[in-house]
Amino acid sequence: MQSYVTLKIEKEVGFIEFFHPNKNSMPSYVLSKLSETITNAGNNENVKILVLKSGGDRTFCAGASFNELIAIEDAESGEQFFSGFANVINAMRKCPKLIIGRIQGKAVGGGVGLAAATDYCLATQYASTKLSELSIGIGPFVIEPAVSRKIGKAAMAQMTIDAETFFTPQFAKDKGLYADVFDTIDALDDAVKTLAEKLVGYNPEALSEMKKVFWKDTEHWDNLLTERAGISGKLVLSEFTKNTLKRFK
């Protein structure tokens, strides 16, 4: 099973799907392809609404690729890796099309960041969330602005500090990360399709202007998320983190 990022257009809805055989973890090349695909889809006149989804029926996204984290040997490489997540979040933020998140399973670390960076997010009862970064010696620095913007600082702090706990989909819904939670993937897909096709019929100029309102006061994120990537890039070199990551080899 090979990793991939694809764009499939159906009735002016662009379905962006990513996949990695290791629980949809995100190595650099997948992150790069994902940010590029989001940007290109945003500029595609044949696309009116975007849906972000992942392959498989279990984990939505397991976050950073531990294999790649273990291989980082200097701060520059560390910053470059974590900038991959920054680039994806910024691509989602700057995309002129509304992005619907389709979260079919667990979201960990960067996966929570992706869900938070969508404009409207739907999930299943299996889509629990966890911010595990502190437990391995780093922190959710890059995704924090997106997550805090969606669920608030208090909930962000709760998830960050309780780093080994999976929070329920109901928690995510109560805090505003998910707009709704469904019993099955089929029900989720029906809801995503219905919403996307409804939005396609709305005034595209109004949708684009509304997206600008949603993301007001985030214009500095290009610099902010790069700075945050630098923090993570240094911490991943610490003795504590290196020793912790060895357990995942």
Image (tube, grey):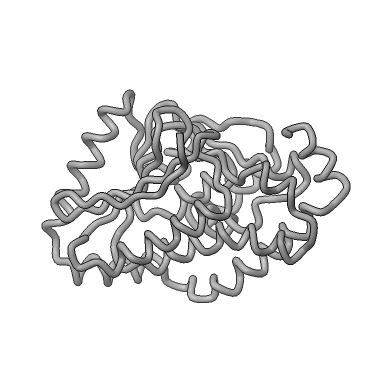
The answer to whether residue 104 is left or right of residue 244 is: left
Q: Residue at x 73, y 66 (%)?
A: 76
Residue lying furthest front: 2
Q: Position of residue 191 (x, y in %)?
A: 23, 37
Q: Residue at x 73, y 34 (%)?
A: 249
Q: Residue at x 20, y 68 (%)?
A: 45
Image quarter of the N terminus? top left
Residue lying furthest right: 239
The image quarter in which residue 141 lies: bottom right
Q: Residue at x 79, y 61 (%)?
A: 74
Q: Is residue 35 above or below residue 245?
A: below
Q: Position of residue 236 (x, y in %)?
A: 77, 52
Q: Is residue 145 above or below residue 175?
A: below
Of residues 82 and 178, which is closer to you in this image?
A: 82
Of residues 123 and 77, which is closer to you in this image?
A: 77
Q: Position of residue 134 (x, y in %)?
A: 73, 44
